[in-house]
Amino acid sequence: MMRRHLMAAVVAAAALGGVPSPATAQAMAVAIVVHPATDVDDLSFSELKRIFRGERQFWDDGRRVTLLVRAPVAEERQLVLDRIYEMDEDQFREYWIGKMFRAEVAAGPKLVYSADMARDLVTVIPGAITFVPLSEVSADTKIVRIDGLLPTDAGYALR
Amino acid sequence: MSRTTMRSPLLGLLLLISVQGVAGQTPQAQAPFLQAFLFGDALFMLQDAAGPDGFKLGQMVAHGNASLSERVVFFGEISISARASGYVLAMERAIVRYEFNDRFKLSGGRYHTPISYWNTEYHHGLWLQGSVARPEAIKFGSRYIPVHFVGAMLEGNLQAAPIHYSVGIGNGRTESLAGAGDAGDVNGNRAFVASASVRPRDLFGFRVGGAVYVDRISSGGVEFADEVITSAHVVWDRGRVDASAEFIHVSHEEILSGASGGSPSFYVHVGYRLTGAARYFTPYARYENMDIDEGDAVFATVLSDYEAYVVGLRYDFDSLAALKAEYRNERIASGSRTDAYVVQASFAVPVAGGN
C-alpha cells in the first residue's frame, strides 16, 4: 500500500511537472509498467532485458509475460530499442521474426499505438508489461523499479 | 499458398510493399492466436559442375505459431520445393508444446534436430541466414546428420545459470539416412539427443554450446551400426558482426564386426554489416570442410569429402527482403575444384492474424 502511495505521488508530481528531480529537467524518462496483479516491484536491468527480449517468458507466479511495445516512431520506443534491445528497427524486426520462426516464443510483442493504449491495456491484460513516458503515467498504474530506482531517480537506466 | 505465388517470386516480392508492421500484432486477445509467416527465395546460378543451372525457384515456406491457450502452443512449418519433376510439398516441422514455465517446456512432433546450431537457428527461412545456402554438412536432404527429428523434447532455460538445454527421444534415421522416421522407427532402438548452450546475460549475442546424438542405424532390415554424433559451436551474432563456427563429428561402429569410423566436419562463417551509406550491405565469407572416413561402411558409399570456399555480398534492399550474390569454389572427393556463381532473392512476409 505504501508503495502504491509512493507511485501515486511520483506520478502526480510528474504529471504536474513539479517533481523536484532531474527527470523533468533532462531527457524523457520511460517508466516500466506492469499489470497491477503482477507480483514484481523491482527488476534488475539485466532481468528487464531478458523479459523484453523474450528470453524470460513467465513471471515467478507462473503467469505468462505479455509484451506490449509501442509502434515505430515513438520516442520511448527508440529509447527502449537503444537501451534494452541494443538494436535498430530492422534488427528488432528480424530478431522477433527469427525468435518466432525458431519456435522460441509463441508470439511476438503486441503493438500499441499510443501511450494511452499501452497504459490501458497493461491494466487489463494479466501478466502484461510495457513502457510509457513518465509524463504519461497515471496514478493507477504500477511502476516497476529498475535496479531499485524509479524513473525520477538519478541514475535511472531508461532516460 | 497458391500456385501463382509459387511460380512468381516477383509477385511475392510485390507483396512486401503492403507489409508495414514489425513483428507484432494488436493486442486483441490472449488465446487462441495465430501468427503466420511466408518465406521464399529464387536464384540464378552458373556453375562448372555437372547439373542444371540457370533460374531456379527455391522454397516457399509457410510458418505458423499458434497459442492454443496460455501454456499450449503449436508451431508448424510447411515447404513447397521446386524439383525437376514438379513441386514437392513437405511438412518440415510440426510441434505441439506445453510450457510449464521458462525451465520446462515439453513438446512432441517433428523438429529440426538440435545437433547443429545452423540447423536450429535458420530452419527453412533463407532470408534469415547470412548466405545463399546452408553448409554442406547441414544441408536439407543430407545423409551426414539427421536434419529432422520425430519424437518428444524437453527444453528450457535454467534459472541459476544462463544455460539453455534440450533433451529428446525420437525415431532416428530411416535406412536411407536422410529420412526422419515419420512413419515410425525402423528398428527398436530410439534415438536420443541432448544439447546445451551457454548464453551469458551480459554478453548478448554470444553463445557457445554443444550436442550429442545417439542412434542405431539399420540397413536392409538389419541393425547395422551404432551412431554417435557430437557437435560444438561458438557464435557471435550482434550488431554488425555475424560469426559462427561449428564442428560436428559422426562416428559409426558396426555391430557385427566392431569396425568403426569417424567423419568430422566444420565450417567458419563470418559476415560484417557495413556502416553509413553502405549499411544495407553485408559481405560474408565461409570455409567449410567435411572429411568422410573411407573405412566407415555407413558413409563410404553415400558421402564424399567436401571442401568449399564461399564469399558473398548480402544486400538488404528492403527491411524484409534481401539479395545475395555469392561465389563458391568447391571440391568434392578428389575431383577438381569447381566454381559456382549465384544470385539469390529471398524475403519474409509476416502475416498477423487473430481469432
Image (cartoon, coloured by chain):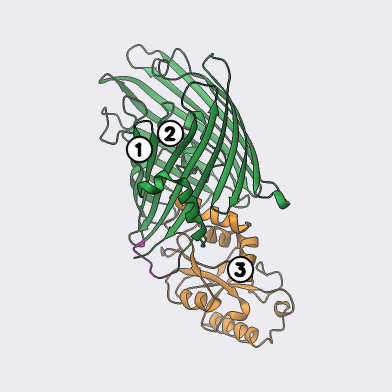
Chain colours: A orange, B green
Which residue carries the number 1 mark? B87
Q: CA distance from mark 3 to mark 2?
A: 40 Å
Query: Which label is found at residue A99?
Result: none
Q: Residue at x 63, y 65 (%)?
A: A78
Magenta stretch containing residue A1, yes or no?
Answer: no
- Chain letter behind tag 2: B
User: Which residue range is magenta in the image?
Assistant: B27-33
Which residue is more in the foreground, B321 or B144? Answer: B321
Q: Is residue B163 above or below residue B184?
A: below
| Number of residues whose C-alpha sits closer than 10 Å to that of mark 3, classed few (under 14), some (14–19) or many (20 or more) | few
Secondary structure under the numbered disc 1 in the rendered image: strand
In the rendered structure, the answer to whether residue A101 lies left or right of residue B92 reads: right
How busy is the neighbourhood of tag 2: few (under 14 within 10 Å), some, or many (20 plus)?
Answer: some
- Camera-nearest residue between B153 and B235: B235
The quadrant in which residue B79 appears is: top left
Find residue A136 and report its horizontal and vertical position in percent. Answer: 59, 80
Give the numbered dot on residue B140: 2
Give the residue at mark 3: A73
Asked if marks 3 and 2 fall on the same chain, the answer is: no
